[in-house]
Image (cartoon, rainbow, N blue to C red):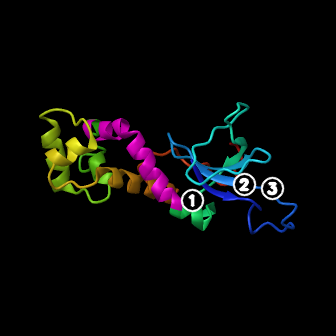
Amino acid sequence: MVLDYLPYGHLTEAMSSYQKRSLVQGVGDTNFVLMEMTPKEGVVPQVGQKVYIGTGERDVIDHVNRRISYDELSNSSKIELTFQIQKIVLDKEERYVRFFNDAGPLTTRMHALELLPGIGKKLMWAILNERKKGPFKSFNDLTERVKSLHNPEKLIARRIEDELMDDKIKYRIFTTEPRPPGDRRR
């Protein structure tokens, strides 16, 4: 998903603007990998557009330059990231509802559900007791059965964003581990 299109590349590069190549900042829709990409010649990707990488007709991206960290995102990308994560979570609702159905304890004192912002022990127990009656089928089903839980898709989106912002976060449940500093592999 395109977060930002930079027609003149990074502002911090020391080249003249006509020498810079255009860049796209984006986020993967499965493991939420942040990427810097080069668009195909003459193509202007739109913010929020789902893009493909390769040689097909509908492909917009020529190649992925590298993985980037949250701190390397442009301000526009950081703002757009919140909306795109929520969109991805809603588009893949079944996957994230499954998290509420399958999440288990991480330690003897902490449950995976507690990693979501706003879920403490009381709400966690309400979710666990309700799922004993049967698996949740959708976000609507979840909020109807657990009355004190509102907008579970936003809780998941916020957790994903927290995992992307903090390279040293202890538990990752939705994102891929960041590359170590200096690792230039894609």
* Residue denoted by label 3: 21
Depth order, front residue of 105/18: 18
User: Is-magenta flag for residue 86?
Assistant: yes
Q: Which residues are magenta?
A: 80-101
Depth order, front residue of 178/84: 84
The residue at the point 61 percent across, 61 percent down is 73
Report the Cα–Cα distance between label 2 and label 1. Answer: 16 Å
Q: Decide whether the magenta segment is chiefly helix, strand or loop.
A: helix
Q: Residue 23 bears which disc, if any? A: 2
Q: What SS does tag 2 mark?
A: strand
Image quarter where the C terminus lies is: top right
Can residue 173 be seen? no
Where is residue 171 shown, x and y percent of the image? Answer: 41, 49
Give the crowd class for mark 2: few <14, some 14-19, many >=20 residues within 10 Å.
Answer: many
Where is residue 136 shown, x and y percent of the image? Answer: 22, 37
Q: What SS does tag 3 mark?
A: loop
Report the Cα–Cα distance between label 3 and label 2. Answer: 6 Å
* N-term-proximal mark, 1 vs 3: 3
* N-term-proximal mark, 2 vs 1: 2
Give the crowd class for mark 3: few <14, some 14-19, many >=20 residues within 10 Å.
Answer: some
Identified by mark 2, the residue type is: Leu
Q: How many numbered discs?
A: 3
Identified by mark 1, the residue type is: Tyr
Judge from the rendering whether residue 102 lies leftward or rightward of residue 36; answer left or right.
left
Is there CB contact under 8 Å for labels 1 and 3?
A: no
Depth order, front residue of 101/82: 82
> Given this view, does label 2 or label 1 mark the residue nearer the observer?
2
The residue at the point 63 percent across, 61 percent down is 72
Q: What SS does tag 1 mark?
A: helix
* Residue denoted by label 1: 70
